[in-house]
């Protein structure tokens, strides 16, 4: 049952991601180019991993003794993609925070600070967890690194919200984008943390379903943020007042 729910949510996820890409390409991509890259990669990865799951039966239940080479490959592809999208999310929220910073001398300082934080957060998983590549890192390292990156992105998103709220010229669209991004990164951090408590069995897919639900919520908010705006109707010429 949980596998069916995951497949259904995957289809809905693909549709929403495609809608966000289409809406962004109608003009907002100039303001959010990195966000477009992230969403496009998520769409590509969703389609690719869905295909890989069908080929390798990647989401089927298995143990350390029964896992197949195909399932092992699917697991590595799944977690490697997670690292990529988590890095993209973190870069997106970092760039948006810089964009939300008011013009002035302070902005250059904030840019340097954000760049240093980004380098530090991306280096921490390598320094803290000491991965062993054989040639892939272990599933435990990949899960821990993903959890840490999403936690860092969630903290940075709070900084973004604080910057937007403190700004005199608030951007309603950027506020909405930040809200969706906050749901996505927080849901990811929580779901990866829950995986430590759900052992292989009937309920092992619950964290994954939670992850997908929070992603759907975030991408729905982005669809709303980038939806096409109706063009204002101009009054017909005969309705305009005549000049004396």
Image (cartoon, helix red, strand yellow):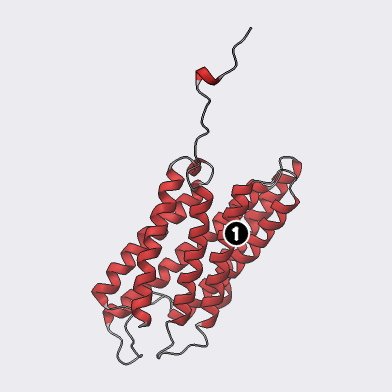
Frontmost residue, 188 versus 24: 24
Drawn side of residue 99 relative to residue 54, left or right: right
Looking at the image, the residue that sits furthest to the top is 244
| Rendered residue at 63%/54% (across/down) | 115
Give coordinates of residue 64: x percent, y percent: 35, 90
Mark 1 sits on what residue?
A: 179
Q: Nearer the viewer, residue 209 or 72?
A: 209
Quarter in which the N terminus is drawn: bottom left
From this view, report whether residue 168 is shown above or below residue 135: above
Question: Is residue 222 placed above or below 7 in the rendered structure?
Answer: above
Q: Residue 208, percent across and down?
A: 45, 77
Q: Position of residue 116 (x, y in %)?
A: 65, 57
Residue at image coords 52%, 88% = 197
Q: Residue at x 51, y 53 (%)?
A: 224
Instruction: Tell me which residue sits at (37%, 62%) in the image.
Output: 45
Q: Residues within 10 Å of mark 1 (few under 14, many from 20)?
A: some
Q: How many marks?
A: 1
Quadrant location of the C terminus in the rendered image = top right
Q: Is residue 131 visible?
A: no
Above or below 85: residue 235 = above
In-image side of 109 versus 75 (left or right): right
The answer to whether residue 37 shows anywhere in this view is yes
Label 1: which secondary element: helix
Above or below residue 62? Residue 94 is: above
Q: Quadrant of residue 50?
A: bottom left
- Which corner quadrant of the image does residue 150 belong to? bottom right
In the rendered structure, the answer to whether residue 82 lies left or right of residue 52 reads right
In the foreground, 133 or 145: 145
Image quadrant of residue 108? top right
Q: Nearer the viewer, residue 79 or 8?
A: 8
Looking at the picture, how far across and down is residue 206, in whole percent? 46, 82
């Amino acid at each position: 049952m949980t596998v069916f729910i995951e497949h259904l949510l995957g289809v809905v996820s693909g549709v929403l991601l495609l809608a966000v890409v289409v809406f962004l390409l109608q003009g907002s991509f100039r303001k959010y180019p990195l966000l477009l890259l992230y969403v496009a990669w998520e769409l590509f990865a969703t389609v690719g991993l869905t295909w890989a799951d069908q080929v390798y039966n990647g989401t089927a239940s298995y143990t350390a003794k029964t896992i197949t080479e195909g399932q092992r490959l699917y697991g590595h592809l799944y977690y490697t993609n997670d690292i990529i999208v988590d890095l993209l999310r973190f870069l997106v929220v970092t760039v948006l925070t810089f964009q939300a910073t008011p013009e002035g001398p302070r902005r250059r300082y904030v840019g340097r600070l954000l760049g240093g934080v980004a380098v530090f957060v991306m280096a921490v998983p390598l320094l803290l967890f000491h991965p062993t590549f054989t040639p892939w890192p272990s599933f435990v390292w990949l899960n821990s690194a993903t959890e840490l990156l999403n936690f860092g992105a969630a903290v940075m998103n709070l900084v973004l919200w604080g910057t937007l709220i403190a700004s005199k010229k608030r951007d309603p669209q950027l506020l909405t984008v930040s809200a969706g991004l906050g749901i996505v990164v927080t849901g990811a951090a929580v779901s990866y943390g829950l995986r430590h408590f759900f052992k292989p069995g009937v309920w092992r897919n619950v964290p994954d379903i939670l992850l997908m639900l929070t992603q759907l919520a975030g991408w729905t908010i982005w669809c709303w943020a980038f939806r096409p705006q109706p063009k204002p109707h101009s009054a017909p010429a005969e309705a305009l007042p005549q000049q004396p």
